Image (tube, rainbow, N blue to C red):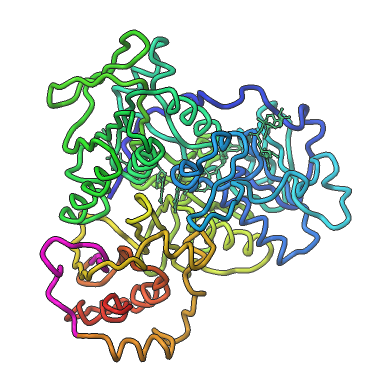
């Protein structure tokens, strides 16, 4: 897995320093029924769940970002494909089908001012922006703001997300004043604005890291530079893109697709040095080669934000990181944790921590329901998706880790089997919404899917011509049980994958299971 190594977190560099709204904590309520710490997806979804169980609920979000809640996925994908130059101002993105959306979940006037929250008749949500919570007194149910003022709560959620980590080389580089502007991290809107502006002006850039962020950004850079005037490097230690996730053959195949987007992929390579040279940065690679670039985006994973553990007597998982919570997402009485910073007990797959959007949604919703009085366990598996350009996309569920044994079943890709096609059809970029509704209690397939399956041909040898991994299903096994599934350019089949995971059966022939996904149809 990706057990976090302990490394120091970098200082927040690009935040609008000093922005606080309200400007004084006197305008933040001293006592609230619901306090949500963090202004990300998990928090916002928890608010929605609280609101639907308790329609006049008064919810206070404390977020140390200057923005109201927004989604991060488009920041490394769609927003870069928006041809307008002012996207960094409008913060909108076009879905593949051309319809335009904002990053923000709600417009500013949706939110109540902090000072008006307690008086509001119908309740709602207020966001104290630029504020953070430094400590909790769990016994007395009090949270302490950065200026020392206290907020008493009845129920509290910690959804503080995660912060990009650095390798030792870049930790040193970032501390060097001459390099500070050339070394970039990428997590929030301000980081996007900064990198977007720097990219416009750059001639050569490097992305370090071969995971989700590095691979998506490298592809986005490649596509944004449609005239191919810039040099874009992507450097990482694995043998192919997404090497920690995909089996090696597929990872290497994917690197060819990333190269086709205009990226110089440099696998099996680490950065051993970074130094300033005029206004640029010179990177020394483990091969001995040097590269001169205008800036580097370091995307080598994140660490969950668990600073409150030390100040508030909360427990952190020593291996996976994140606050330890039970299956109902409780850390302590009336204290819940969700999203990237939660290490929860999944009754089917064991202890987990997940760093994906849909998990933030699923766990935020569950925490919100439970804060409002339910006692629901974590049973609905979240999914995740990634697109590497408009032609390669995948969706996945469960434990997807290339160190597990895998079985892949592939078929030929058609023009309908692309992320672009699925968004065009559904008008929805968020792939966790285009999957069919969870039908956990129902049979595997709809009648239509069943009859399609009957007609579908016998599975062909695999992959079709030895080279084409255009479309397929990859099963990840632990003790011969399927614990994870990647749907590779196969869309709208997540409910089937969810059912296969739920069954926890040992299958003799996974080709038979692959047939359920009807990958040879259409
Ligand atoms: P976050 O979104 O990180 O929100 C936490 C918030 O809490 C932040 O605003 C933080 O500043 C604030 N905070 C932290 N500490 C404090 C404190 N003490 N007091 C107050 N506030 C605090 N996932 C996918 O599944 N698919 C994708 O395509 C995808 N794309 C991504 C693209 C990018 C560029 C990034 C960065 C991530 C992407 N992810 C994607 C991952 C996904 O965005 C995260 O898993 C998700 O944002 C986690 O939500 P969260 O609410 O737990 O945390
Ligand atoms: P921006 O990049 O912050 O905003 C661009 C667009 O996004 C606008 O349409 C705006 O309505 C919308 N938007 C911005 N923040 C939003 C949020 N938090 N929630 C929902 N929608 C949001 O544009 P800008 O020119 O940098 O700032 C716009 C105004 O906001 C200015 O008056 C600025 O001083 C003030 N401001 C806002 C923030 C903030 O939290 N967004 C921080 C500092 C200053
Ligand atoms: P990641 O965990 O996906 O990838 C980490 C990568 O860092 C590894 O694949 C490796 O190539 C690289 N790395 C690790 N140690 C290194 C070292 N010493 N030297 C060089 N490279 C090293 O993390 P990320 O790509 O940085 O993404 C950041 C966060 O954002 C993650 O939580 C990720 O899940 C999330 N994210 C998710 C999506 C998505 O789900 N589609 C998209 C973007 C970002």
Q: 475 or 57, which is in the foreground?
A: 475
- In the rendering, at what x and y percent does residue 113 appear? 80, 41
> Quarter-wise, where is residue 140 in the image?
top right
- Residues drawn in magenta: 458-477
- In the rendering, at what x and y percent does residue 221 appear? 38, 37
Q: Residue at x 39, y 85 (%)?
A: 449
- In the rendering, at what x and y percent does residue 522 appear? 33, 78
Q: Is residue 501 left or right of residue 343?
A: left
Instruction: Using the image, determine if residue 94 lies above or below residue 438.
Output: above
Q: Most extreme residue toward the top, as rendered?
A: 278
Instruction: Using the image, determine if residue 397 lies above or below residue 106.
Output: below
Q: Residue at x 21, y 69 (%)?
A: 410
Secondary structure mainly formed by the magenta segment: loop
> Quarter-wise, where is residue 133 in the image?
top right
- In the rendering, at what x and y percent does residue 460 appear? 15, 78
Q: 77 or 366, which is in the foreground?
A: 77
Q: Is residue 324 left or right of residue 233?
A: right
In the image, residue 422 lies in the stretch drawn in magenta = no
Q: Is residue 253 left or right of residue 185?
A: left
């Amino acid at each position: 897995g990706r057990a976090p190594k302990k490394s120091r977190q970098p200082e927040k560099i690009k935040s609008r320093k000093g922005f606080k709204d309200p400007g004084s904590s006197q305008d933040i309520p001293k006592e609230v029924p619901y306090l949500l710490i963090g202004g990300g997806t998990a928090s916002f979804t928890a608010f929605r769940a609280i609101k639907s169980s308790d329609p006049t609920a008064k919810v206070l979000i404390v977020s140390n970002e200057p923005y109201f809640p927004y989604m991060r996925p488009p920041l490394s994908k769609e927003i870069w494909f928006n041809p307008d130059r002012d996207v960094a101002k409008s913060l909108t993105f076009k879905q593949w089908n051309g319809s335009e959306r904002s990053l923000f979940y709600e417009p500013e006037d949706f939110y109540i001012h902090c000072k008006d929250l307690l008086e509001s008749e119908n309740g709602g949500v207020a966001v104290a922006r630029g504020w953070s919570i430094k400590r909790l007194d769990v016994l007395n149910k009090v949270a302490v703001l950065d200026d020392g003022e206290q907020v008493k709560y009845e129920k509290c959620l910690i959804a503080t997300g995660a912060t990009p980590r650095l390798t030792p080389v870049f930790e040193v580089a970032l501390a060097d004043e001459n390099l500070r502007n050339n070394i970039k991290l990428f997590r929030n809107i301000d980081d996007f604005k900064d990198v977007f502006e720097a990219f416009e002006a750059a001639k050569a850039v490097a992305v370090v890291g071969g995971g989700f962020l590095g691979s998506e950004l490298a592809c986005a850079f490649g596509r944004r530079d449609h005239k191919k005037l810039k040099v874009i490097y992507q450097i990482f230690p694995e043998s192919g893109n997404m090497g920690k996730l995909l089996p090696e053959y597929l990872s290497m195949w994917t690197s060819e697709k990333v190269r086709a987007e205009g990226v110089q992929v440099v696998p099996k390579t680490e950065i051993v040095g970074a130094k300033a040279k005029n206004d640029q940065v010179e990177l020394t690679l483990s091969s001995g080669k040097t590269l001169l670039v205008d800036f580097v985006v370091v995307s080598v994973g994140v660490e969950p934000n668990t600073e409150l553990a030390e100040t508030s007597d909360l427990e952190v998982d020593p291996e996976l990181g994140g606050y330890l919570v039970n299956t109902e997402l409780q850390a302590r009485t009336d204290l819940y944790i969700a999203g990237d910073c939660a290490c929860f007990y999944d009754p089917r797959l064991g202890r987990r921590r997940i760093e994906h959007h849909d998990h933030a949604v699923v766990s935020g919703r569950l925490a919100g329901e439970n804060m409002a009085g339910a006692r629901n366990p974590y049973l609905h598996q979240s999914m995740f998706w990634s697109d590497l350009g408009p032609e390669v996309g995948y969706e996945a569920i469960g434990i997807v880790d290339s160190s597990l044994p895998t079985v892949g079943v592939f078929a030929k890709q058609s023009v309908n089997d692309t992320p672009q096609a699925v968004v065009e059809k559904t008008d929805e970029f968020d792939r966790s919404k285009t999957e069919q509704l969870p039908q956990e209690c129902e049979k595997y397939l709809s009648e239509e899917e069943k009859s399609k399956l009957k007609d579908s041909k016998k599975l062909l040898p695999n992959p079709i011509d030895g080279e084409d991994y255009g479309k397929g299903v990859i099963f990840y096994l632990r003790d011969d049980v399927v614990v994870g599934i990647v749907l590779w350019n196969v869309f709208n089949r997540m409910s089937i994958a969810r059912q296969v995971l739920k069954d926890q059966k040992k299958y003799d022939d996974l080709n038979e299971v692959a047939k359920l996904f009807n990958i040879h149809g259409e």
